[in-house]
Amino acid sequence: MPEISDIVHLKDLWDEKEAASLAGNPLALLRYRSNLLGADLRITNFGGGNTSSKFELPDPFTGKPARVLAVKGSGGDLGSIQESGFALLYLDRLEQLKNRYRGEQYEDEMVDYYPLCAFGQNRVAASIDTPLHAFVPAPHVDHLHPDWAIAIAAAANGKQKLEEFNRKFGRKIVWLPWQRPGFELGLQLERAIKDNPGCDGVLLGSHGLFTWGSTQRECYLSSIHTIDQMGEFILEHQKKSGPVFGGLDHAALPNRADVAAAILPALRGIASSNKRVIAHYTDHEDALTFAGSKWAAELGQLGTSCPDHFLRTKICPMFVDWDPAKQTLDDLKAQIEKRAGEYRSTYAAYYKDWATPQSPKLRDPNPSVVLIPGVGLFGFGKNKKEARITTEFFINAIHVMTGASALSEGEASHPYPQSRHPERSKEFASARNYVALPRSEAFRIEYWALEEAKLQRMPPEAEFSRKIVLIVGGGSGIGRETALLLAGKGAHIVVADMNESAASEVAKEAAAVAGKDAISHTAVNLSSTESIAAALRHTILQFGGVDVVVNTAAIFPVGANPDGTLTEAQWDTTFRVNVTGNYLLARALGNLFREQKLPASIVLTSSANAVVPKAGSEAYDISKSALNHLIRELALGLGPLVRVNGIAPATVVAGSTMFPRDRVMQSLKKYKIEFSESESTEELRGKLADFYAQRTITRRPILPADCANAIRWLASDESAKTTGHIIPVDGGLSEAFLR
């Protein structure tokens, strides 16, 4: 067993006490081992790699011990997998499948047999890598995709360098040329181990690493020890090599986040030409180094090598050739549009070149990764988590390219060791000692029927999936309720409020519903153009743009003069927030929406008071009347791309910051409604709301949820043909009937 003291770059996270508590449960120990391996992205990426254990369980049919394979289920993630995420299969039945195997061209049909090998009531979809684990003659097996290992696996001189590695560290790791994951690779892996007695690992060309052990602990140590040694090997070569990627042509811009915010709406709009996507921007040091390097375009066009990488990053990133020292932002936007068109055409040609009548239909031809010198890396996906993970995968790919390039010892020549058949070596493209998969092999994986089946098993997307919603006034009342409602319907939400602490609390509530990746918060002051611009910038950098803007923020001034009337300053502030603030918000959004070029929706909050005059609330009432007409003007000015509508609630007392405890008690006294000062604020608000409800036809209090439901409809595609309208949410207030 490897010595713990020999591990330099990684950490041994194994806790003997915790492991001992799981000793009687081999599946729990497998989960524990898997979680430790998945906790470090240097060991494996999100959703990548798989682990397995072979052990005995009582056969539910005979009661006798049966040898079982537990292997990570299809689509699972090692870092977060639970015991329920492992497929359990009879090991002897998997062995019997060798007799059913008709050869490599028929290997996909073997997947249909895996469910027939399921143990007991386990119905977890077995991974395509199941035979790889079943046929390795060891109780515990790890198959991982560490950057350092793939750097050797993707090097043009990788087999030679693996032999050097083995000599240096006294190892017996075997090289296996590239083979698409599946039954055939499982048989090749089994033969390679049998043909090399004493081997202690297998490196799959252009793919990843296999290690194993006789115990869970030994397997874990074997994995991190091997990866750590490979890291030492790569890092030593990097110290001796020249500047990374040939050195920098373009240094990182000091204002790169400003540039990213300026281009992201247009970039996201272009990347959404087929279907809306969510963006993730990172100025990770390695991404900046690669994007600004001399070799970026050359290496970038090769794409990634590991199949786990390019399933998310596509065959290659979109590299935007922009010189920040000589060109303007307008030049950059023009270049993005040009390159996107070229990328889509190239991707469609790639599909046409390799598709067969049985291939799934052409998928989104837009890039999922974009690199811009001086600015950084942009990832796109169906949601924020997918977009973030996509950028993480490409940073993994950058690490692989870094390592493979550092291993160079001059011009490598064909045949490359990744190719099983020397005569097909030239199908593998290479640059700077880095070898990428042939486009034919990339297509076979990307458009694999088994991958398509995995996509088809995904649950349908929620109503607001792929939509970015900015909720101004989201810290309380209607705004809070809207945030929670839309979070449950798949929206990506920025909760904005004058009270940033309140926005933060609501964001936490929404994150508990939608996940932390989908929710953010920021402060905003509607009376300040700078604050509005900052809130929009935050939203753009967080998610890439905006699709829906909801504003529920407003002020209801209470007279500060001795006679109870408003001061001039209060009057001005009321209109500045309730009317001008909405105009300033819409004006800023107009520029963003024009850049984004995607249909969008704005929902503003008016009031029944806009058409029902009331003594003592003139400033509020008139400001809402002005807002009603502003909604109509904005609908004209921003259409047809942007719809602008509003809701007009009657008095909403519950959860409203407009009804602090003192004001509620004052109103209860005014209307001679009995109450006790020991009652909670919400109880007092409930009494006042019930009183107001008696003025309506339905006699039911107007709740924040009622308004949120109306906002949801106006924000959704269900109301795609409604604009310039204000929907009453007033319980049937006859005085507010439109005339």
Image (cartoon, grey):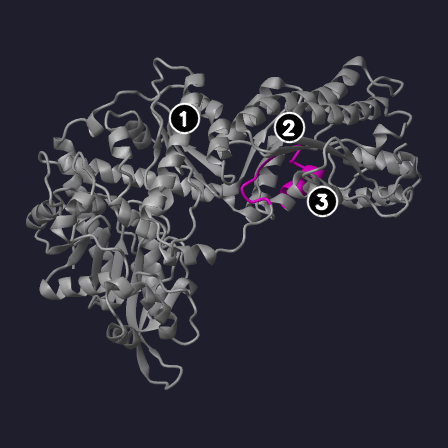
Q: Which residues are the magenta region?
A: 464-484
- Residue at x 83%, y 23% (from the top left corner): 622
- Residue at x 78%, y 18% (from the top left corner): 570
Outermost residue toward the front in this view? 357
Give the residue number, with chain letter if any, for mark 1. 338
Asked if residue 212 lies in the magenta stretch, the reply is: no
Q: Earlier in the sequence, mark 2 or mark 3?
A: 2
Task: Name the spot of residue 104 as percent of width and height, x first.
Answer: 24, 63
CB under 8 Å between discs 1 and 3? no
Q: Please name whichever residue, 590 or 102, is drawn nearer the observer in this view of the structure.
A: 102
Q: Please name whichever residue, 521 or 316, is drawn nearer the observer in this view of the structure.
A: 316
Q: Earlier in the sequence, mark 1 or mark 2?
A: 1
Identify the secondary structure beneath mark 3.
helix
Give the residue number, with chain letter if any, for mark 3. 709
Q: Please name whichever residue, 628 or 97, is drawn nearer the observer in this view of the structure.
A: 97
State the quadrant of the C terminus: top right
- Residue at x 35%, y 42% (from the top left corner): 314
Question: Is residue 676 in sight in this rendering?
Answer: no
Q: Amino acid at mark 1?
A: Lys
Task: Name the spot of residue 154 as percent of width and height, x first.
Answer: 20, 44
Question: Is residue 93 in sight in this rendering?
Answer: yes
Task: Name the spot of residue 124 as percent of width and height, x first.
Answer: 42, 66
Eyeballing the image, is 84 above or below 332? below
> Are there few (<14), some (14-19), or many (20+) residues within 10 Å of tag 2?
some
Which label belongs to residue 498?
2
Asked if residue 483 lies in the magenta stretch, the reply is: yes
Observer-side mark, 1 or 3, equals 1
